[in-house]
């Protein structure tokens, strides 16, 4: 179990660095749904708030509510996200730069993973695995919707997809107090 966790953590770190590098090499500076309205952070980083949460300078989320998630027995927070109209159970990971999809979840969304170009690789305890960038039209969690979300399909058995900063940084606030995470 610990080995799987370490492999997942290492993979997330490498994916985060790799996707940031890909974003930095973009040759087209025209605004996209994922970056339109963003300030200098390009939606790759957030600022830690004094109250224990994260906030981005510009909000790209359409929200009709506040979402509260309880801490699971494994100490993580999980959200049932609706991605492009399909439900996917995801672990909220503020340390992941992007939304990271398992191959299984990507295929459930109708993404033909083998047709996606490999956009880099991640070194994990299980070896080197490829990652395939993809743009998601919409990610919604209990009424909070973000459109144009950068993601990557990870060719490794992560076990669960990750709801990372390409979604979280577009929210007005993400706070953790005790065993409750609040997203606005």
Image (cartoon, grey):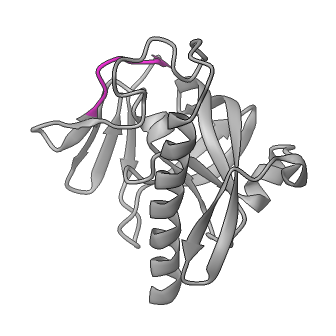
Residue 125 in sight here: yes
Q: Is residue 149 above or below residue 37?
A: below
Q: In this view, does 66 lie to the left or right of 83?
A: left
Residues in magenta, as a range: 55-62
> Which residue appears at 31% of the width and 27% of the height?
56
Q: Is residue 183 left or right of residue 127?
A: left
Residue 98 in sight here: no
> Which residue appears at 9% of the width and 38% of the height?
50
Q: Give the percent coordinates (x, y) of residue 59.
A: 39, 18
Specify whether residue 49 is painted magenta. no
Q: In this view, does 143 lie above or below 10?
A: above
Q: Give the percent coordinates (x, y) of residue 125.
A: 54, 83
Q: Is the magenta stretch mostly helix, strand or loop?
A: loop
Specify whether residue 60 is painted magenta. yes
Give the quadrant of residue 54.
Answer: top left
- Residues 94 and 14: in front is 14
Give the quadrant of residue 133.
Answer: top right
- Residues 174 and 22: in front is 22
Q: Is residue 23 above or below residue 6?
A: above
Query: Total label count?
Result: 0
Give the quadrant of residue 184.
Answer: top left
> Which residue appears at 80% of the width and 44% of the height?
109
Q: In this view, does 113 lie to the left or right of 15?
A: right
State the residue lying farthest toward the left. 50
Q: Give the percent coordinates (x, y) of residue 153.
A: 70, 53
Q: Give the percent coordinates (x, y) of residue 47.
A: 23, 35
């Amino acid at each position: 179990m610990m080995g799987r966790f370490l492999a997942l953590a290492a993979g997330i770190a490498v994916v985060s660095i790799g996707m940031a590098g890909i974003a930095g090499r973009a040759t087209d500076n025209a605004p996209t749904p994922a970056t339109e309205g963003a300030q200098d952070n390009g939606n790759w980083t957030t600022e830690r708030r004094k109250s224990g949460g994260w906030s981005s300078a510009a909000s790209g989320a359409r929200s009709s509510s506040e979402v509260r998630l309880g801490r699971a027995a494994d100490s993580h927070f999980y959200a049932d996200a609706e991605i492009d109209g399909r439900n996917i159970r995801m672990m909220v990971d503020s340390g992941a730069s992007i939304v990271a999809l398992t191959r299984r979840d990507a295929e459930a969304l109708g993404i033909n993973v083998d047709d996606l170009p490999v956009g880099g690789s991640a070194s994990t305890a299980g070896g080197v695995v490829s990652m395939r960038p993809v743009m998601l039209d919409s990610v919604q969690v209990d009424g909070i919707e973000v459109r144009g979300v950068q993601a990557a399909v990870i060719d490794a058995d992560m076990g669960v997809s990750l709801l990372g900063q390409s979604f979280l940084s577009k929210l007005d606030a993400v706070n953790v107090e005790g065993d409750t995470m609040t997203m606005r």
